[in-house]
Image (cartoon, helix red, strand yellow):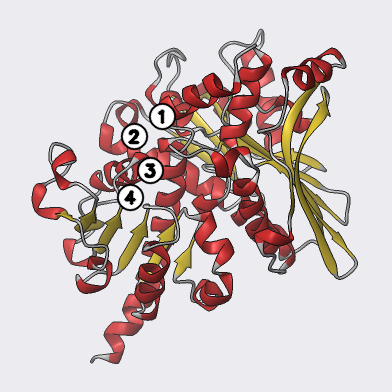
Amino acid sequence: MSALSVLRVDGASLHSEARLNALLHHVYGELRTRRRVVVALPAGSALAGNPLLAALDEAGVPTRFVGAHDASPRAAGSSAIELHRTPHQVHEQSVLVTSHDTLVAAWPNSTEWQPEPWAPAENRLRIVLLGLGTVGLGVYRHLAHRPDLFEMVRIVVRDPSKHQHEVPANLLSTNAWDAINCPADLVIEAIGGLEPAADVVHAALVRERSVITANKLLVASRWSTLQRFAAEPARLRYSAAVGGVVPILETLADLRRGHVIRSVRGVLNGTCNFVLDALERGATLEAAVAEAQARGFAEADPRADLSGADAAQKLCLVAHAAFGIHLDPSEVETDGIAALSAEDIRRAHSGNRRIRLVAECTRVGDSVHARVRAVPVAAGDYLCAARGEENRVEISTAGRRCVRLRGKGAGRWPTALAVIGDVYDVLRARRLELPAARCSHQ
């Protein structure tokens, strides 16, 4: 738990699209398993325009650079890495980026990172992708980097003519039931909503296909039907349904194995956070929502975000991961941001506070109290510092330990990277099953 992962990267990995993509997924995979990650770049690597830093930033992975810009690079860098290595009561999961020479001072026995070798094509995961919108297209582009690992057998869209310049036309279909009819190992659901997603996902799971979804409404409202498929061996995975690139559910599951979790509080809706920042700058609600939609942070119908319903659905999944208790969204006290006035924003700002849509669940005896509400948050509060589409979460345990997480919670690349994290988990689980499967047929 919270082990240190040290990756010394060569220049070739920064200037090869395939290697850079593999490195991005490796770094994110380490974060998902609660490792503290140190990435050492070649000495003299420029910060501005560095491909890895640009990829991490685009995906919304929290990153801190130490070394070259410090007055005493070796001393400062070594101290930062030592702090990163040592567990402490209040810890924020992030990636520490430094230079080779700074790393050697703190970790002289580090080894060079190498990408995973290409696998035989017969081991590929056959995938049906439902949806090619903001998230779906990002998922497709990630998968396309590893044709040795992933074979796309069908992509379901509403209008194939809109996507023929983005993907091979022979992959496109308008029939969501291709998730059942086509031979496949994995179904990725990125169409959203309940219909037809709920029926198709359930049918795919019954057919013993793995399913990955970012659809928090589907998982929260149909949990009684889906829960048995999320148990071991897990065929339903939904990490991207909460927090975008922030590994909230994975962290809670890991913490729960060794700690008693007391409470979880966070900013879980990047759309609302983006809108609140715009309101503070003087924008109208309509203008702020329109900008969020233009940037791909808000749906065409933003009511679930603004009402707090989206955050409430996510909080139900958080409560289950933290406490093992299922809540229906109707059980969450919910109050969104739609009714906020300019005066509310000004009053909070004049008191050195910012309004944030805070989702919180707390264990009270054998029950869990959950609520979502827009509240003024003090300047020194960890949640107050959430900016734009960022999500932030604080997890408190009975041992007075506090784990903090942050990262982008909305947009194509943060959500797509979280989905791909689940895809690699499915791939690893399948590889563990393959030897036994072969033996059973001999």
Mark nearer the N terminus (4 vs 1): 1
Which amino acid, mark 2? Answer: Leu
State whether residue 406 is above or below residue 192: above
What mark, if any, has residue 55 been given in the picture? 1
Mark nearer the N terminus (2 vs 1): 2
Contact, mark 2 vs mark 1 (Cβ under 8 Å)? yes
Label 3 neighbourhood size at 10 Å, few (<14), some (14-19), many (20+)? Answer: many
Q: Which residue is mark 2?
A: 20
- Outermost residue toward the left in this view: 170
Which amino acid, mark 4? Answer: Glu
Which amino acid, mark 3? Answer: Val
Question: Observer-nearest residue: 438 or 149?
Answer: 149
Mark 2 or mark 3, whichever is nearer to me: 3
What mark, if any, has residue 348 been given in the picture? none
Label 4 neighbourhood size at 10 Å, few (<14), some (14-19), many (20+)? Answer: few
Q: Residue at x 16, y 43 (%)?
A: 167
Question: In terms of image quadrants, where is residue 331?
Answer: bottom right
Label 2 neighbourhood size at 10 Å, few (<14), some (14-19), many (20+)? Answer: some
For residue 171, say whether it is visible: yes
Q: Which residue is mark 4?
A: 116
Mark 4 or mark 2, whichever is nearer to me: 2
Q: Which residue is mark 3?
A: 135
x%, y% of residue 332? 73, 56
Mark 4–mark 2 Cα distance, whole angstroms, equals: 12 Å
Mark 3 or mark 1, whichever is nearer to me: 3
Question: Observer-nearest residue: 317 or 102?
Answer: 317
Mark nearer the N terminus (4 vs 2): 2
State whether residue 1 is above or below residue 17: below
x%, y% of residue 141? 27, 41
Mark 3 or mark 4, whichever is nearer to me: 3
Mark nearer the N terminus (2 vs 3): 2
Mark nearer the N terminus (3 vs 4): 4
